[in-house]
Image (cartoon, rainbow, N blue to C red):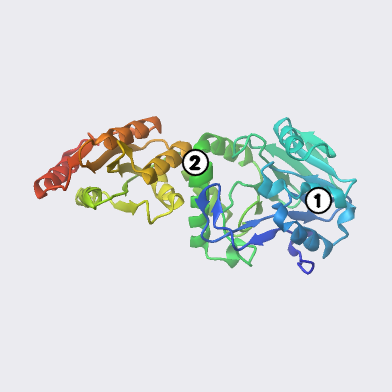
């Protein structure tokens, strides 16, 4: 593509990234609305590029830069994060601008970029380092484990712009670059999904980053994915404060798979019983709902019930996948219990409980095991257990 145009976001500062309308899976979670790979060009005495894009979109990156200046004039490239969705166009960009110095975090950014792309013209930086590019200064702030060890953000005090890379972003393909040009509810929903499915394990690191950035005067957050924040900055900052706190709400999520509907009947009874107790409950069949959507709901819900029938003396593969997925996200301050039906062995329910314990959930109710088809009396007993439980 040779006709892509840069988008001006401030005087002599341009968005030169790419929109990936077709992306539907990222890191194993479903991205229903695609994504963007954001990169930014600053025209100053030293032409500076903040990040690149996924290598399949490198022609768009170069085309957008070329619509403003000759890419060979780039003198500084800031690589905020080694992950390929942000860095894999570095070799192509460095080939076009061979004199460009590639700034990366020390030591992890340097190690990661070298491991992926070999020897390029790297300049490692650490906390407190800054450079002058002419009228503007770039200050580098490491944000380790948000969400890789090498992650950093870049702050331009003269423009009051924070180039935040993965922080504060969302997977959202849109032709409009700014938050106020899009539906705020959709943006915040996608930002929450992004946090829940990628950043949830790093709540403490997110809180540390918020404290570090708290003293900065920020009028624009230029993210690595999704929209650029300029009108609703307090909304996304407040959301990150809430999400990173580990705060959960009086809400339940029921997740199950079923073979002949018995476990499904139990799951529905559990959800309805929570509702009778005054606790809102969501109800998910893993065969029909993407894990990322379920994880986003679990994120701030206090209770989780997971059900599986027994198959081959074990857990249904879909539930095993779900438990593996949620374990990797390391949820905190949650309570859970296991349930399921069986024909003869019934081992799956205990296995689900063990996996919930291993994932860090507090077991709040004795596992529910029902042979064959649940009777009305057994379902009534489940309801009574949930209504009378001391959660």
Q: Name the residue under label 1.
A: 92
Q: Quadrant of residue 216?
A: top right
Answer with left or right where residue 197 lies relative to residue 12: left
> Foreground residue, 182 or 330?
330
Circle on res. 200: 2
Position of residue 369 measured from the top left corner of the image (x, y, whole percent): 20, 38
* Residue 364 appears in the picture as rendered: no
Q: Position of residue 358 (x, y in %)?
A: 39, 30
| Residue shown at 24% from the left, 48% from the top | 263
Secondary structure of residue under mark 2 = helix
**Percent position of residue 92, x then y:** 81, 51
Position of the N terminus by quadrant: bottom right
Query: Which residue occupies 51% across, 56% down?
Result: 190
Q: Residue furthest front?
A: 312
- What separation in Å lies between label 1 and label 2 (alpha carbons)? 33 Å
| Position above or below: 270 against 66 | above
Judge left or right: residue 15 versus residue 365. right
Q: Quadrant of the C terminus?
A: top left
Residue extending farthest bottom = 3
Residue 99, image x, y percentages:
90, 45
The numbered mark at residue 335 is none
Q: Is residue 18 visible?
A: yes
Counting residues from the start of the chain, the first of labels 1 and 2 encountered is: 1
């Amino acid at each position: 593509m040779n006709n892509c145009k840069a988008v001006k976001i401030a005087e002599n500062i341009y968005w030169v990234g790419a929109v990936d309308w077709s992306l539907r899976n990222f890191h194993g979670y479903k991205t229903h609305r695609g994504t963007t790979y954001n990169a930014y060009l600053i025209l100053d005495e030293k032409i500076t590029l903040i990040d690149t894009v996924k290598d399949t979109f490198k022609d768009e990156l170069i085309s957008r830069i070329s619509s403003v200046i000759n890419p060979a004039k780039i003198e500084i490239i800031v690589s905020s994060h080694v992950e390929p969705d942000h860095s894999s166009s570095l070799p192509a960009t460095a080939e076009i601008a061979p004199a460009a110095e590639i700034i990366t975090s020390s030591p992890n950014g340097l190690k990661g970029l070298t491991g992926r792309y070999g020897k390029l013209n790297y300049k490692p930086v650490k906390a407190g380092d800054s450079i002058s590019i002419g009228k503007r200064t770039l200050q580098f702030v490491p944000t380790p484990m948000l969400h890789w060890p090498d992650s950093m953000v870049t702050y331009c005090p003269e423009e009051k712009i924070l180039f935040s890379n993965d922080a504060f972003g969302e997977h959202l393909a849109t032709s409009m670059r700014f938050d106020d040009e899009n539906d705020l509810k959709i943006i915040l929903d996608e930002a929450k999904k992004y946090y829940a499915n990628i950043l949830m394990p790093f709540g403490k690191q997110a809180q540390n980053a918020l404290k570090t950035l708290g003293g900065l005067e920020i009028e624009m957050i230029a993210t690595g994915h999704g929209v650029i924040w300029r009108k609703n900055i307090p909304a996304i900052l407040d959301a990150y404060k809430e999400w990173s706190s580990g705060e959960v709400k009086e809400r339940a999520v029921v997740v199950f798979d079923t073979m002949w509907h018995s476990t499904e009947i139990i799951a529905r009874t559990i959800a309805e019983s929570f509702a009778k107790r005054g606790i809102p409950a969501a109800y998910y069949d893993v065969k029909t709902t993407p894990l990322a959507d379920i994880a986003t709901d679990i994120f701030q819900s206090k209770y989780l019930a997971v059900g599986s029938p027994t198959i081959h003396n074990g857990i249904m593969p879909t539930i095993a996948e779900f438990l593996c997925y949620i374990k990797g996200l390391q949820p905190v301050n949650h309570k859970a219990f296991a349930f399921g039906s069986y024909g003869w062995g019934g081992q799956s329910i205990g296995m689900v409980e063990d996996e919930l314990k291993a994932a860090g959930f507090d077991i709040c109710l004795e596992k529910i095991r029902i042979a064959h088809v649940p009777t009305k009396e057994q379902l009534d007993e489940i309801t009574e257990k949930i209504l009378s439980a001391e959660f």
